[in-house]
Image (tube, rainbow, N blue to C red):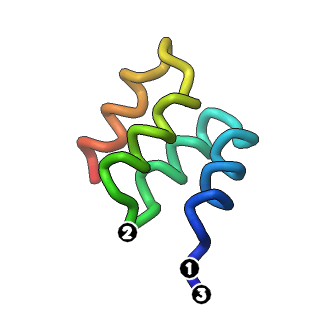
Amino acid sequence: MEKKFEEIKEEFINASLDEKIKIYTSTQGLTVEQFKELLAYFPIKYLDKLERAVNSI
């Protein structure tokens, strides 16, 4: 059974930086708005690291 978005968001908020990147790049089925909401909980200074991970998928 797929996790509900609120569960994914809670896990994302509490995750380490590397775990956040893994969750963001491996979670499927989210809407653009849900991905944007997760980004609100991602440390801005590491966005380049997330961008590299997303581009390497």
Image coordinates for residue 43, horizontal then vertical, percent: 56, 21
**3D distance between C-alphas at marks 1 and 3:** 4 Å
**3D distance between C-alphas at marks 3 and 2:** 13 Å
Query: Closer to the camera, 15 or 31?
Result: 31
Tell me the crowding category of disc 2: few under 14, some 14 to 19, or many 20 or more residues within 10 angstroms, Cα based. Answer: few
In-image side of 39 versus 12 (left or right): left
Secondary structure of residue under mark 2: loop
* Image mark count: 3
Secondary structure of residue under mark 3: loop
Q: Amino acid at mark 2?
A: Gly
Image coordinates for residue 48, horizontal then vertical, percent: 36, 22
The residue that mark 2 highlights is 29
Label 1–label 3 contact, CB within 8 A: yes
In which quadrant is the N terminus drawn? bottom right
Q: Which mark is residue 1?
A: 3
For residue 42, which quarter of the picture?
A: top right
The residue that mark 1 highlights is 2
Label 1–label 2 contact, CB within 8 A: yes
Tell me the crowding category of disc 3: few under 14, some 14 to 19, or many 20 or more residues within 10 angstroms, Cα based. Answer: few
Q: Amino acid at mark 3?
A: Met
Task: Specify which label sits upstream in the sequence, 3 or 2.
Answer: 3
Residue ID at (51%, 29%): 40
